């Protein structure tokens, strides 16, 4: 068992350190990780790649995203910190073809090209490759113990405990109590959702509503004063925030504050780490907004809101099961079970249906309620099919490139159809992935939420 501190290296990032009692690790699916170290000088590090190369000829703003630009940078920094090139050893992992496999995965082969590019660079630089574990169909974790310089590759999602294998399903009465016990998303935030979907709406009424909720107001001001806005002026009131930030950014911060409080009710059943559900929501919102802006078929603000809300049903199911099975999701992940099917068997409903029920109770706009209900089966959407297809694609991207926090394996059955619904071609998928800010694929909810004002 590890006793040292673990540092997660998120997508598009690297970490270099001298000998220390720490372990670096990266969760890998389609992405590729490379651990390089010189035990003699006690210098090493780990880098986590998203794509094999930039999609344009211009030098990328985020070189760590790409193998072709990130590997030279990583090697340069290792040597700068004192590593000797002739003593370096490398381990390479990731680049999986994620199941269920389709011809689209084979045609794009992002994972395979990631791995090939990394190995090619190491060979060209005459760096000793100690171990390669790439391809296959499973996510994995690449780690590097910086105290003894021992790398390790292991399947991702291994549960910390084998307890609670037999789950006692909650009764219908217990399910109703779980729904009743959930603190709802404040009406002020629901008004904000409607604002984001309406042109020319006034902010005055919603600001007055927010002022009545001290918790939401305090959370909004905290977000507005975060590193997100990088300004010197202190924002003390909602009126100041509106003037300094603008309508859309402020309304987004209100939604973030409300969703953070809502997901904070979750137990430990679904959350793979503290704040896991909230971070998944924030990252999904950012990616959905990017997809909507690229397609031009859905208002980006609406897609952002849908990304935040699509998994709200997980909280009520989590509450119903957390006491009897706190490692529910982790155990289901190990079994490679279809989580929607398992939810249906245990609760009598899956999280999409639970979310739809909550959306009805709280009078969500119909397009959001419909998307929450059908984001895993967008072909069944009646109200806002394009919005559901955007959230479906968002989940697909998360499952391929954000394996440490992804909650539901996504079928690629409707991948091409979803792209076509949005006027996007499959050949543009790498370009779409490239649009995603690396913060959205990281592990820190606060850093991801800093992108709230981004376009």
Image (cartoon, rainbow, N blue to C red):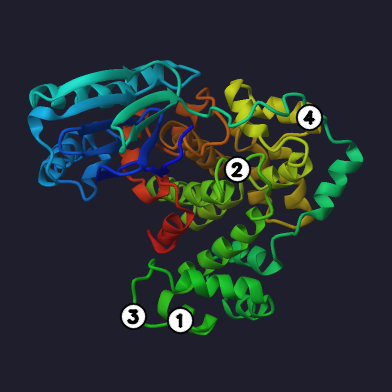
Q: Residues within 10 Å of mark 1 (few under 14, many from 20)?
A: many
Q: CA distance from mark 3 to mark 2?
A: 35 Å
Task: Place residue 84 in its image quadrant.
Answer: top left
3 vs 2, front mark: 2
Whether label 3 touches label 1, CB < 8 Å: no
2 vs 1, front mark: 2
Residue position for label 2:
271
At numbered mark 3, what does the secondary structure look like: helix, strand or loop?
Answer: loop
Query: Residue 305: x and y, percent?
Result: 56, 55
Q: Could one spot residue 264 in this view of the protein?
A: yes
Q: Residues within 10 Å of mark 3 (few under 14, many from 20)?
A: few
The mark that comes first in sequence, 3 or 4, is: 3
Whether label 3 touches label 4, CB < 8 Å: no
At numbered mark 4, what does the secondary structure look like: helix, strand or loop?
Answer: helix
Residue position for label 3:
232
Q: CA distance from mark 2 to mark 1?
A: 32 Å
Q: Nearer the viewer, residue 130 or 352?
A: 130
Q: CA distance from mark 4 to mark 2?
A: 18 Å
The mark that comes first in sequence, 2 or 1, is: 1
Q: Nearer the viewer, residue 102 or 95?
A: 95
Horizontally, residue 64 falls left or right of residue 11, namely: left
Q: Determine the residue positioned at 67% across, 39% down.
A: 269
Q: CA distance from mark 3 to mark 4?
A: 51 Å
Residue 225 numbered mark, or none: none
Task: Place residue 63 in its image quadrant.
Answer: top left
Q: Residues within 10 Å of mark 2 (few under 14, many from 20)?
A: many
Residue position for label 4:
346
The mark that comes first in sequence, 3 or 2, is: 3
Residue position for label 1:
235
Query: Residue 378: x and y, percent?
Result: 59, 34
């Amino acid at each position: 068992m590890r006793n040292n501190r673990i540092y997660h290296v998120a997508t598009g990032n690297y970490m270099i350190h001298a000998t220390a009692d720490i372990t670096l690790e990266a969760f890998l699916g389609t992405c590729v990780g490379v651990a390089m170290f010189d035990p003699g000088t006690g210098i090493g590090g780990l880098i986590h790649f998203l794509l094999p190369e930039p999609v344009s000829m211009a030098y990328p703003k985020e070189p760590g995203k790409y193998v072709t630009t990130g590997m030279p940078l990583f090697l340069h920094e290792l040597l700068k910190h004192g590593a000797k090139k002739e003593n370096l050893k490398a381990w390479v992992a990731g680049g999986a073809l994620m199941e269920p496999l389709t011809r689209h995965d084979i045609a794009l082969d992002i994972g395979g090209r990631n791995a090939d590019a990394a190995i090619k660079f190491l060979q060209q630089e005459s760096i000793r490759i100690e171990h390669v574990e790439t391809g296959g169909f499973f996510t994995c974790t690449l780690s590097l113990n910086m105290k003894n310089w021992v790398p390790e590759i292991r399947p991702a999602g291994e549960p910390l405990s084998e307890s609670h294998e037999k789950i006692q399903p909650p009764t219908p009465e217990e399910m109703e109590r779980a729904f009743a016990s959930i603190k709802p998303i404040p009406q002020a935030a629901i008004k904000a959702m409607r604002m984001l979907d309406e042109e020319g709406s006034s902010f005055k009424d919603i600001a007055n509503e927010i002022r009545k909720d001290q918790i939401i107001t305090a959370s909004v001001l905290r977000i507005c004063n975060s590193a997100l806005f990088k300004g010197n002026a202190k924002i003390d009131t909602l009126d100041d925030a509106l003037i300094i930030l603008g309508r859309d950014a402020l309304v987004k911060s209100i939604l973030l504050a409300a969703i953070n409080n809502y997901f904070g009710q979750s137990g430990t059943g679904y959350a793979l780490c503290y704040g896991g559900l909230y971070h998944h929501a924030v990252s999904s919102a950012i990616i959905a907004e990017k997809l909507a802006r690229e397609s031009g078929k859905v208002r980006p603000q609406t897609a952002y809101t849908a990304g935040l809300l699509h998994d709200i049903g997980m909280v009520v199911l989590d509450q119903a099961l957390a006491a009897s099975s706190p490692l529910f999701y982790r155990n289901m992940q190990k079994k490679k079970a279809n989580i929607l099917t398992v939810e249906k068997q245990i609760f009598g409903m899956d999280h999409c249906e639970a979310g739809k029920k909550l959306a009805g109770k709280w009078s969500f706009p119909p397009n959001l309620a419909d998307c929450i209900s059908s984001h895993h089966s967008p072909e069944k959407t009646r109200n806002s099919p394009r919005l559901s297809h955007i959230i479906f694609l968002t989940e697909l991207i998360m499952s391929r490139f954000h394996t440490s926090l992804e909650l539901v394996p996504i079928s690629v059955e409707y991948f091409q159809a979803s792209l076509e619904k949005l006027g996007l071609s499959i050949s543009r998928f790498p370009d779409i992935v490239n649009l995603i800010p690396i913060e959205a694929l990281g592990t820190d909810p606060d850093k991801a939420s800093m992108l709230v004002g981004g376009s």
